[in-house]
Image (cartoon, rainbow, N blue to C red):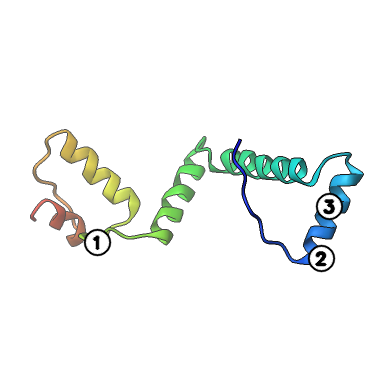
Amino acid sequence: MARIHVILADDEKARYQNQAEREGKSLGAWLREAAEERLTAAAARDRIDSVGALRRFFQDCDARETHPEHPGLGARDLLHCACCRRRGVTAVKSYDPALAAVFGG
């Protein structure tokens, strides 16, 4: 079992410790449970199970990063280009100059 060192303000530690004791748990068990709850919530939130969720996923990707070679393209376009290349597509017709540039257009 691994050990970690967590730095907390004194008032934070006191609040967490008090809550853990009210629940009949050690501070370590309470912190582990809280971390697992956060991971479970994040996994449920990140699940792509609708068109709206897929759109939000691509918007989040676009907000986080850009591709250094193709800064004008968003995540959706980059995924499309990767799929095209994997299938052997060598050219695309597009009114988007950044998208056309990926294929040398």
Q: Secondary structure at mark 2?
A: helix
- Residue type at numbered disc 2: Asp
Badges 1 and 3: C-beta atoms under 8 Å apart?
no
Q: Secondary structure at mark 1?
A: loop
Mark toward the viewer: 1 or 2: 2
19 relative position to 12: left or right: right
Find disc 2 in the rendering and name its residue: 11
Location of the C terminus by quadrant is: bottom left
- Residue 29: image location, x then y, percent: 75, 40
Q: Which mark is residue 17?
A: 3
Q: Residue at x 62, y 49 (%)?
A: 4
Question: Could you say which is closer to the camera, residue 60 or residue 43?
Answer: 43
Query: Mark 2: few, some, or many residues within 10 Å (few <14, many ≥20)?
Result: few
Q: Residue at x 84, y 40 (%)?
A: 25
Vertical placement of residue 60 versus 54, above or below: below
Vertical placement of residue 88 versus 95, above or below: above
43 relative position to 90: left or right: right
Badges 3 and 2: C-beta atoms under 8 Å apart?
no
Q: Residue at x 19, y 57 (%)?
A: 95
Mark toward the viewer: 1 or 3: 3
- Residue 80: image location, x then y, percent: 26, 44
Q: Earlier in the sequence, mark 1 or mark 3?
A: 3
Q: CA distance from mark 1 to mark 3?
A: 46 Å
- Residue type at numbered disc 3: Gln
Find disc 1 in the rendering and name its residue: 68
- Residue 71: image location, x then y, percent: 26, 63
